[in-house]
Image: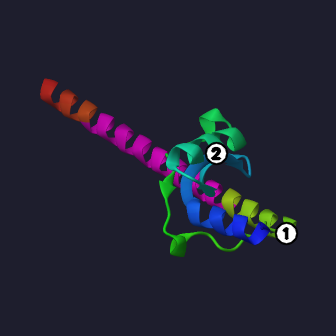
Amino acid sequence: MHKLFMHLINTLMKTYTALIKATVNGNMRAVPTQIRALNPTDARWLLQAIYGFHSLVSPPTEVAESEAISEIIRPKTPEQLRLDNLKAAKDRANDALKSERDRQSKQRAVKTLSTINMNSTHSALS
């Protein structure tokens, strides 16, 4: 009886994927999530019940069975998370350094232009 029931469920249910808002390492991200349901409306209700009403970023779309996620993604170890955080901090520091250099370069250019404009107005007045 159990095998027959599971076979019926697996033939009637379809796999749907949707984007869910989730906080990952302190950052808000859209995470693709898969769920099995009879139709897209049921998939939407299930996702909202599990993750919260406002967490659904995109509507559920049916996935071909060949594209369904068949393996569970293992969570990262604390060491891997630390390395990821350090790499992200390095990237943020590099971006901040580049933007500061750009800001200072623009400031020097504006100062040079204002000096040129002042010299041209003084020579025009003479």
Left-right relation of 114 to 11:
left
Seen at 56% across and 51% down, the residue is 19
Residue 113 percent location from the top left of the image: 30, 39
Asked whether residue 34 is drawn in magenta, I would say no
- Binning the other alpha carbons within 10 Å of mark 2 as few (below 14), some (14 to 19) or many (20 upward) gives many
Q: Total marks drawn?
A: 2
Please state which of residues 20 and 116 is positioned toward the viewer in this rendering.
20
The tag on residue 47 is 2
Residue 53 percent location from the top left of the image: 63, 34
Magenta region? 90-116
- Here the colouring is rainbow
The residue at which mark 1 appears reads as 79
Does residue 103 lie above or below 16 as drawn?
above
Seen at 63% across and 56% down, the residue is 35
Q: CA distance from mark 2 to mark 1?
A: 31 Å
Left-right relation of 12 to 108:
right
Tell me the SS state at disc 2: helix
Ranked by sequence position, the earlier of labels 2 and 1 is: 2
